[in-house]
Image (spheres, grey):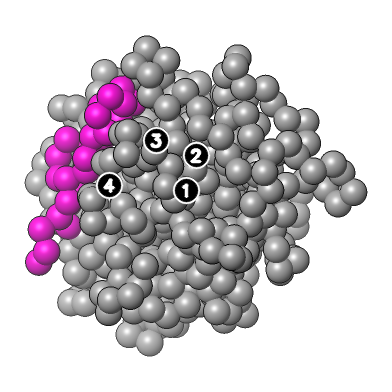
Amino acid sequence: MTPTRTLDVVTQDRESEARTPAKPLRAIPPAARDGYAAQPPRPEWPGPALLDLSRIAPGRPTAQGEVIEVSGRIVDGDGRPVGGAVVEIWNCNAAGRYAHVDDANPDAPLDPDFHGFGRLMTDADGRYRLRTIRPAAYLARADIGWWRPPHIHFSILGGGPRLVTQMYFPGDPLNAQDPIHMVIPPDQRPAAIAEATADGLVWDIVMRGRHRTPFEGD
Amino acid sequence: MTASNKPTFTPEATIGPFFPFRFTDGSQWQALPAPGTGHRADGVPVALTGRILDCQGAGIRNMIVESWQANAHGRYRHPDDDHSDHQGDAPLDPAFDGFARVRTDADGGFRIATIKPGAHPAVSGNAMRAPHLRLTIFGSGIDRLVTFAYFDDEPANPADPLLASLEEPDRGRLVARRSPAEDADGSTAYRLDIVLRGDAETPFFDDWQE
């Protein structure tokens, strides 16, 4: 049996220090490996091929900042597309503020034209595409000068163990100073950074787990 | 990224402090049919209540708890659970998906209203899986954590292969206790506190090997 992992504590992150289990994760006995990867109910979808977060609704003004598109393909460890997966996306605005009640950053104003969150479903080939505003860096802890680099949060349900992750931007010098980014093992960090292409940012995602992902309609 | 034959799995990250409320509040992602509908899931309505605690024993607000379980007949709504190796024929319940997502309150408290899952045969061997919920926990500062919640009045618990893989007191840390004071809305309440770190740390599991 493969040894189980012990989770890393993010340095300088007091929440991580207070909340990360100290003991190694336990192995699930083979006879009990019957969770069948949680299958959340599908959101109301298919919608448009493109999830557009750059404006609150059609006809409303475009949010402040640089409009970017991010696209990619979600596959499992065998390279098979994860079709019909529910993808949740959220990011802060061009000033570095989330449209969330807990974000009270006084130096970063809310943008009335930006919510910065939405859901989509991957197509049968595992592809997704979204348009949003390039998020700014923001000061996560003023006392130690910890700036979070620009990043977009992704949550993927349906297709192996649940994945919550963050997409980083290529070439950003803050990446290498961010404890949350640097807790990723060095050989895996490139997999958390999107690629800049003529077609916008491209970020492919590889999910763990042996279970086949059911397609919509299965 | 996938130039070699061996893919690099996308690394996990903390969900952070700003997971949108829209993704939990008013969501259809509750284990039971939405209030006001005429649908009733098969089985006994239960509520799993508890608090999520840090290393100081303090409740943690704004944690996300996801629950996933079999229906009252012991069947998961998943294409791989075709019951071809099960005794009998456990049906799907059209009124029950088995997935729920809630957010902890200011005291770290949560309440998952669902139905008690059925026992079902283990995927190998002759053991039965006792009724249980699979809980996945997210929050600022941590990556995903996976644990399980059992019910203290289930005679199937001692033979459950996952519970049996643990020693006391860890085993008891996965067993929710009957909590009559919290019964509400016709549901039978069970209580389980989840300790993320510390002496009474809840056992968490590695599902990457599943």
**Does the rendering let one see residue B151?**
no
Q: Mark 4 lies on which chain?
A: A
Residue B173, percent across and down?
23, 39
Using a 10 Å C-alpha cutoff, classify the residue at mark 2 as few (fewer than 14 neighbours), some (14 to 19) or many (20 or more): many
Tell me whether circle 3 and circle 2 mark residues in contact (CB < 8 Å): yes
Query: Residue A70 is drawn in which quadrant?
Result: bottom right
Using a 10 Å C-alpha cutoff, classify the residue at mark 3 as few (fewer than 14 neighbours), some (14 to 19) or many (20 or more): some
Amino acid on which disc 2 is placed: Pro
Pick out the residue farthest to the right.
A59
CA distance separating discs 2 and 1:
7 Å
Identify the residue at image location x=68%, y=48%: A67
Residue A210, percent across and down?
32, 74
Q: Is mark 3 on a helix, strand or loop?
A: loop
Residue where numbered disc 4 is placed = A184
Q: In this view, does B148 lie to the left or right of A104?
A: left
In-front residue for pair A176/B12: A176
Tell me whether circle 2 and circle 1 mark residues in contact (CB < 8 Å): yes
CA distance separating discs 3 and 2:
8 Å
Residue A135, percent across and down?
58, 39
Reading the chain from its start, which is encountered first: label 2 or label 4? 2
In-front residue for pair A164/B204: A164
Identify the residue at image location x=23%, y=34%: A9
Residue interval drawn in magenta: A1-27
Residue where numbered disc 2 is placed = A150
- The quarter in which the N terminus of chain A is drawn is bottom left
Residue where numbered disc 3 is placed = A174
Tell me whether circle 4 and circle 1 mark residues in contact (CB < 8 Å): no
Q: Is mark 4 on a helix, strand or loop?
A: loop
Reading the chain from its start, which is encountered first: label 3 or label 2? 2
Residue where numbered disc 1 is placed = A169
Amino acid on which disc 3 is placed: Leu
